[in-house]
């Protein structure tokens, strides 16, 4: 096991109706004037935004609002948010929404306290300070409610890039599974895929003897398979929503991924798809991950056979482990289809003629140095081949 | 799933040689003068204490020392520690040792800032403030390095009681698996048993639909079974020690136990054994837990069958689930024997004639109200029967 540090100081508040305590927690953690940051549509229509505002008013927390976060959140809105926070002397950023809104809130919270261009953080500069961030989560997916990560898309060039830092771990996160019951099945499935992708990015490693994190990841994957089917079949299944919501947080706060080299090539390969075609990140991952698995299978057949038997319930073929490994990948694809996810390029609206450009941007765009991933170190040619497997 | 809050703000530093950074982390988290609290013997002989002192000196952190913590740590030393901290204006408590030392340090840290008798906390008063605490862990067992719990024994009456509060979660914990390589096999096995007991106390619940935490707990149990055998067979197996150490933290920081009713009767039943006979807590648990399982089996046969199949690898007997459930308990007992743990009263030096007194103290002593546990609510008569099963 590799040496590591692990720090997850977020205060999680989990359960029905807890969004009505958003104001209480802002006050508890020292906020006096908040930016309420959100997307559009459902958060307003459902009355959630109003309930959150009421809770702030009850605690005499002043606030300003900035809506309009889109999936694959854009840098332009971040600049707007930074300016607004400075002008209004905001001391707390509250995200009401999913991963896109939370990631945008994180970028604003870091940018407010930084003299330079916030995009520097998305080109590798570590984030060391930020305004405190609270979240009211509306979809189980990105894990941003418990992570120190944020992904933003820069409109000039449509670069989609990530930034990290302990300072952007949320101070508190309110997780009410009931808020996810009204999600369309497609969005639920995209979230499930994203969570499973976060687990696979950690699972496929060259670090030896990491039994404890292997077993934790496998446990979370098994949970996702069972509970996703229940939530898709019955959107009001609070218990299924609750299991998925906690699994989504645990999948990405890194307690189950410590001490091991992680991969993350699939996320980078996907980011080009959602940046180019504006598809949902989870849907893109559903297309990318099986292709990545098939391409890297021979690097460590036994690891693929392990997940096939332990997670997908395949019988181990001891005379032909590769057969078992492939069965596991097939089971994953079948599962993705069963929850309504795309598994091919055309279903995403992606085009074969864009492959070379996307592979080049993934490997060299905006400061990258030519390779992706750690389980297998992929070059531009490899990435082209992986995209081709998706057609 | 029940509503819950989860807050684990401890900064974990994991890996070889990290004890040499103790001073760095005290400084980082605002300490200027520390109490170094420890047991005796091995911490001094191994040179660990000196390395820690050197690291404090390097960072110009002043310190005073208080050694002498015994297993089942005593209230008298806590009073001594509180007095010393006040006299010396200590602002940080650093525990160098295992669960007993950390628990004693927590009691001191809370007591220093409290006007009344610190024992109030161990009779149910929540701990709301404490000096910051750091730990350098020397045995994987209690999970106190990541928990908000502390257990202390009051010499008058030999009451062994627990206290809890977010304020006593360590500010930082240094986890170097190599420090556990010199432990005697018996102590390693006691620690393994304690970790597994923390998992079982959470696993046996009446809360329905808690798949995510079931699967996480099962994953940690499977890890313990595999890695314990390796660490006992080869004490220098750093990887096995590392897996056990992270599993021990995860078993008790409660990320895998949230949202469900937990039991804890077995811990209370055991505390009477270690308070009466001064046996190791883990050894006591090895005797108590299988007896508790046999006694409560019929309350929920399918839950016992689930752990038997998923963790112990038993084949499910669908025509007789109780048979499978019992096979799982037998597998647990066999495992405990294989790592050198006692499984009967006599091996602990416990005596049948003390049963009634222990059962009475467990149920009524020092403020208790007559029953223990939540999976099955046990009265004094039940506890007597469980003790009898251990003979």
Image (spheres, coloured by chain):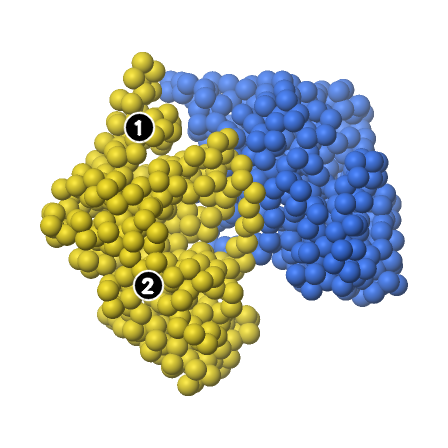
Chain colours: A yellow, B blue
Q: Residue at x 38, y 18 (%)?
A: B319
Q: Chain of mark 2?
A: A
Q: Residue at x 82, y 57 (%)?
A: B63
Which numbered dot is residue A314?
none
Q: Is residue B133 left or right of residue B115?
A: left
**Image position of B31 with respect to B136: above or below:** below
Q: Residue at x 70, y 24 (%)?
A: B185
Q: Position of residue A255 (x, y in %)?
A: 50, 46
Residue bearing the label numbered 2: A152
Look at the numbered disc 1 and give the secondary structure of its residue: helix
**Image position of A290 with respect to A38: above or below:** above
Q: Position of residue B167 (x, y in %)?
A: 66, 59
Q: Nearer the viewer, residue A92 or B379?
A: A92
Residue bearing the label numbered 1: A298
* Quadrant (top left, top right, bottom left, bottom right) of the C terminus of chain B: top right
Q: Nearer the viewer, residue B77 or B65?
A: B65
Q: Residue at x 33, y 46 (%)?
A: A371
**Image position of B212 with respect to B82: above or below:** above
């Amino acid at each position: 096991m590799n040496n590591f540090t692990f720090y997850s100081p977020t205060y999680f508040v989990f359960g029905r109706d807890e969004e009505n305590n958003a104001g209480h927690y802002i006050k508890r953690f020292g906020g006096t004037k908040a930016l309420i940051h959100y997307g559009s549509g459902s958060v307003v229509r459902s009355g959630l935004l109003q309930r959150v505002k009421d809770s702030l008013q009850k605690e005499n927390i002043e606030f300003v609002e900035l809506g309009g976060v889109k999936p694959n959140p854009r840098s332009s809105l971040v600049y707007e948010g930074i300016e607004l926070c400075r002008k209004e002397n905001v001391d707390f950023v509250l995200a009401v929404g999913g991963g896109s809104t939370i990631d945008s809130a994180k970028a604003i919270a870091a940018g407010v306290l930084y003299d330079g261009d916030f995009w520097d953080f998305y080109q590798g500069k570590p984030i060391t300070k930020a305004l405190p961030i609270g979240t009211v989560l509306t979809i189980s997916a990105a894990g941003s409610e418990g992570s120190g990560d944020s992904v933003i898309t820069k409109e000039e060039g449509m670069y989609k890039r990530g930034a990290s830092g302990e300072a952007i771990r949320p101070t508190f996160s309110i997780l009410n599974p009931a808020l996810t019951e009204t999600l369309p099945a497609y969005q639920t499935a995209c979230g499930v895929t994203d969570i499973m992708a976060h687990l696979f990015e950690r699972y496929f490693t060259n670090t030896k003897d990491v039994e404890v994190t292997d077993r934790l990841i496998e446990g979370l994957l098994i949970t996702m398979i069972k509970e996703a089917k229940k939530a898709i079949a019955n959107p009001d299944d609070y218990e299924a929503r609750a299991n998925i919501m906690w699994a989504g947080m645990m999948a990405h706060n890194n307690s189950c991924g410590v001490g091991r080299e992680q991969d993350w090539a699939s996320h980078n390969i996907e980011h080009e798809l959602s940046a180019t075609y504006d598809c949902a990140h989870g849907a893109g991952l559903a297309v990318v991950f099986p292709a990545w698995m098939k391409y890297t299978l021979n690097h460590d057949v036994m690891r693929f056979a392990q997940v096939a038997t332990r997670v997908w319930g395949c019988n181990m073929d001891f005379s032909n482990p590769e057969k078992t490994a492939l069965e596991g990948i097939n089971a994953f694809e079948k599962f993705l289809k069963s929850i309504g996810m795309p598994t091919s390029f055309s279903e995403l609206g992606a085009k074969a003629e864009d492959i070379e450009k996307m592979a080049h941007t993934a490997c060299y765009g905006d400061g990258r140095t030519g390779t992706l991933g750690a389980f297998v170190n992929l070059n531009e040619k490899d990435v082209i081949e992986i995209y081709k497997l998706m057609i």
